[in-house]
Image (tube, grey):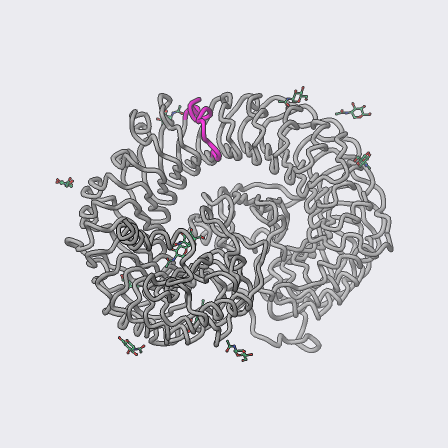
Amino acid sequence: MDYVKLVLFFMLFPFLCQLTFCSSLYLLCPKEQALSLLQFKNMFTIDPNAYCFEGVQSYPKTLSWNKNTDCCSWDGVYCDETTGKVIELNLTCSKLQGKFQFNSSLFQLSNLKRLNLSYNDFSGSLISPKFGEFSSLTHLDLSDSRFAGLIPAEISRLSKLQVLNIHGYSDGFRFGPHNFELLLKNLTQLRELNLEYVNISSTIPLNFSSYLTTLHLRNTQLYGTLPEGIFHLSNLQSLDLSGNPQLTVRFPTTKWNSSASLMDLVLTAVNATGRIPESFGHLTSLRTLRIASCNLSGSIPKPLWNLTNIEVLYLGDNHLEGPISDFFRFGKLRLLSLRNNNFNGKLEFLSFNRIWTQLEWLDCSVNSLTGPIPSNVSGMQNLQWVSLSSNHLNGTIPSWIFSLPSLIDLELSDNHFSGNIQEFKSETLRRVSLKQNQLQGPIPKSLLDLQGLQFLLLSQNKLSGHIDSTVCNLTSLLVLDLGSNNLEGTIPLCLGEMSILQVLDLSNNSLGGTINTTFSIGNRLGVMKFDGNKLEGKFPQSLINCTFLEVVDLGNNELKDTFPIWLGALPELQILNLRSNKFYGPIKDSRTDNLFAQIRVIDLSSNGFSGDLPVRLFENFEAMKINSEKSGTREYVGDNFYYPISLIVTTKGLELKLPRVLTTEIIINLSGNRFEGHIPSIIGDLIGLRTLNLSHNRLEGHIPASLHQLSVLESLDLSSNKISGEIPQQLASLKSLEILNLSHNHLDGCIPKGKQFDTFENSSYLGNDGLRGFPLSKDCGGDEGVPQPTTPFGLDQEEEEEEEGDSAIISWQAVLMGYGCGLVIGLSIIYIMLSTQYPTWFSRMDVELEHKILKRMKKHKKRISV
Ligand SMILES: *[C@@H]1O[C@H](CO)[C@@H](O)[C@H](O)[C@H]1NC(C)=O
Ligand SMILES: *[C@@H]1O[C@H](CO)[C@@H](O)[C@H](O)[C@H]1NC(C)=O
Ligand SMILES: *[C@@H]1O[C@H](CO)[C@@H](O)[C@H](O)[C@H]1NC(C)=O
Ligand SMILES: *[C@@H]1O[C@H](CO)[C@@H](O)[C@H](O)[C@H]1NC(C)=O
Ligand SMILES: *[C@@H]1O[C@H](CO)[C@@H](O)[C@H](O)[C@H]1NC(C)=O
Ligand SMILES: *[C@@H]1O[C@H](CO)[C@@H](O)[C@H](O)[C@H]1NC(C)=O
Ligand SMILES: *[C@@H]1O[C@H](CO)[C@@H](O)[C@H](O)[C@H]1NC(C)=O
Ligand SMILES: *[C@@H]1O[C@H](CO)[C@@H](O)[C@H](O)[C@H]1NC(C)=O
Ligand SMILES: *[C@@H]1O[C@H](CO)[C@@H](O)[C@H](O)[C@H]1NC(C)=O
Ligand SMILES: *[C@@H]1O[C@H](CO)[C@@H](O)[C@H](O)[C@H]1NC(C)=O
Ligand SMILES: *[C@@H]1O[C@H](CO)[C@@H](O)[C@H](O)[C@H]1NC(C)=O
């Protein structure tokens, strides 16, 4: 009997051991390893706020490590069953924080096979060369753990490695020269390699492990030509080389040896110029194909339609063409982006039942799609993001779109949709953009019931009726853009109670009455555009409660008030436009400090202001005293609002609609008032000024020589005043000046010579009988006394480059001749809204067209100086 018990005991021993008491007998973790682990633990603090990526729980595993228990039982520690030695350490997402010592006690665990330290915070530590001493290591994961600097060549000693993951975005995380080549050459067992965001800065060598299943080298500064062998790795499942624009990729033209295994092919923004080869048709296992921003052209080759398992397809930002209807063949699509190509045809195929029931994301923006959206579509239960913006779609927007049960973002702007907007039933909606269409009728009531709505963009349509005060029920709303419609009635009083609203654009409608809306304390309003309406009465006092205001545009209304100097107390105010109203009276000069300290654009033109120019106010314009030309960063007013702030400005004799306003666009326009007295020389301190327009006033005295300090001034208009004396010769140093208008004053003496002054024509000086010199026919007689230019004529290289850069963010819609400004015919150019960042659908526009319009502007500018 006892014998049987004994046999039974030995048979069950291992199981009992694991369950209960005897781990201390033969699974005991060697003491020195426990000690090493505890030392390692003590090198770090626990960051309670650390979080991990979705789906993985982040918790401090090392907290369970305790010297009174067997280290093999510790969280994240695994031992060899026979030797008891620690062979695996899984400390991913363990909230560790602190420097990782070069001589860390961890390196004493020489039997480690798997080491996962990903998603901790090693605070910019270098990776120790001692990692190369873990000679048994098969799996090493150091990703996203804030390691930095040079990755040691010693990693290449880990010749048994099967999985190496070091991806992570951090400054200067990089390989030394040839180390990448060495790595691939030596790690012959590699199956998975992920080095995303490491600066490899190398070509891809021809030698690499034939076992590779996963190769992820996104954003690694690779260059040269991708060896075709990569496509023939017979086990390859996932290849991601995106974001290596210098890497030339030529796809195999015949069979790919990886065709049976390859599931994810991600080659966004590599140099893969040319057509998509037919050989792609062999990749029958493909689930994900992303070849966006690759300069690809031509149509989708027929064999590709065989790839019926594709779920994710990104072909955006190429030059691909062909009818959109063919895409119905990819019946399992979840995400489809064809944005910014030349696809054409109609969307009829959407009405084929059964297909695309799992579609979540549909982006066909910026193509040449025509016709209506079919009305009999059903089954798109999962559709969350729809963008069809910037096509030629027309007809009414069918009601099924407004009833999609999962819809979050509906972007249909810049098409030819007409008819009324139907009732909305998609309660999940957060963003609706129907801008730039021909929609008419009222704003549907149901739209104003969508409690989660954050962005409502309906501008540039023909919507009519009143703005219902139920709009204020949209308590999540951040941006309300109803501009450029035919809305009438008054501005709802309750708008002032929308506590998180940031952008309120009601411009260019027929709204009337006084602005009685009371904005409450604590509101977040940053942009208020009511320009181009028929608003009357006083300037709204309660704006003083809007401490986040950056832009106030009330131009082109019928407001009748004195200058709201108190507005200067708003600390963020950058743009104030009151042009073409009935403001009157002198601008009370205030000595209060910090008034209008951030102002960059102030346009008070075409009002009835009188008295002296506000010298003390100019003194306060701190933001204008900075010439940020050389800072290099390109910032826009209102960048924080995820919404491009457009503004109509008059500069260089043109009326421009800027789609976004650069913070360097510094403008003072006080023209068309009854200002009198002298031009204060303090204006010369506002060295950031690009446009100064004091024309059509009653100014007298001399032009202050201090204006020569305005080194970035592009447009100076002092015309139609009573200014006398000579043009200060120092102004010849204004190297950026493109437009000068001094006409209709009482100036005399010699026109300065050199630089920009050699480019101005007669029209700049008309109506000043005393002026002499080029370009006027009256000779100035000799060059004596006229300073010669010290640098060669023209824009210097840097400025020309900057101008090129500017052109990339503005795009052209129409050139309308015949804009009348004062007496002379001007040219009005309307730019369309375009943002490089948001909404993403707009990010790439026809750059060539932009260049054309800029050239045209340059050509015209001399002929049209006002
Ligand atoms: C490592 O730990 C993470 C999170 O604690 C867990 O999700 C993962 O499955 C573990 N990995 C292994 C191989 O045990
Ligand atoms: C590592 O080196 C530091 C000094 O550079 C020393 O203080 C520390 O004790 C060493 N740690 C180990 C585990 O050897
Ligand atoms: C490390 O852990 C993460 C989970 O946080 C996991 O995704 C990754 O695959 C692991 N690395 C290795 C090499 O097992
Ligand atoms: C390459 O791997 C071998 C072991 O297979 C090793 O001895 C050698 O040092 C490694 N070379 C480099 C440069 O790391
Ligand atoms: C990447 O490294 C190369 C050479 O080491 C260097 O010239 C380049 O500036 C680096 N690029 C980035 C983005 O850090
Ligand atoms: C892109 O590839 C083409 C050939 O396909 C080559 O002529 C061109 O120089 C490459 N461009 C870059 C930036 O490598
Ligand atoms: C793939 O497409 C081609 C042409 O479109 C066709 O001839 C071929 O039979 C298809 N192959 C498969 C496996 O469906
Ligand atoms: C839509 O545009 C097409 C031309 O692309 C035109 O034939 C058709 O009449 C238009 N339909 C509507 C409703 O405007
Ligand atoms: C919307 O606001 C109105 C008052 O303007 C109120 O009567 C109505 O109950 C509100 N609706 C919702 C859904 O909150
Ligand atoms: C604004 O208030 C004034 C005076 O209280 C009133 O006469 C006017 O009708 C109100 N206007 C609007 C649009 O409510
Ligand atoms: C500022 O807001 C408060 C309510 O928060 C309001 O009572 C007050 O009248 C507002 N100020 C002005 C000048 O309208």
Is 584 placed left or right of 686 in the picture?
A: right
In the rendered view, tell whether residue 602 sits above or below residue 204.
Answer: above
Asked if residue 523 lies left or right of residue 701, the reply is left
| Residue at image point 77% right, 32% down | 518
Residue closest to the eye, 751 or 320: 320
Ligand 6 sits in which quadrant?
A: bottom left
> Whole-percent x and y of residue 105?
48, 73
| 287 sits left or right of 761 in the view | left
Q: Which residues are magenta?
A: 395-410
Between residue 506 and residue 517, name the one nearer to us: 517
* The stretch drawn in magenta includes residue 400: yes
Can you tell which quarter of the image residue 775 is in?
A: bottom right
Residue at 59% x, 35% y is 481
Any part of residue 788 in sight? yes
Residue 730 versus residue 829 in the image, above or below: below
Residue 167 in view: no
Residue drawn at x 33%, y 46% as measured from the top left:
315
Toward the viewer: 405 or 296? 405
Q: Is residue 102 above or below residue 767?
A: below
Q: Residue 536: which quarter of the image?
A: top right
Q: Position of residue 644 (x, y in %)?
A: 57, 45
Count of numbered marks: 0
Residue 216: image x %, image y %?
Answer: 34, 58
The residue lying at 81 percent from left, 43 percent from top is 563
On the rendered structure, is 88 left or right of 700? left
For residue 706, which quarter of the picture? bottom right
Considering depth in this image, is 465 or 757 the residue closer to the camera? 465
Residue 419 in picture, x, y percent from top left: 47, 22
Residue 161 covered by magenta stretch: no
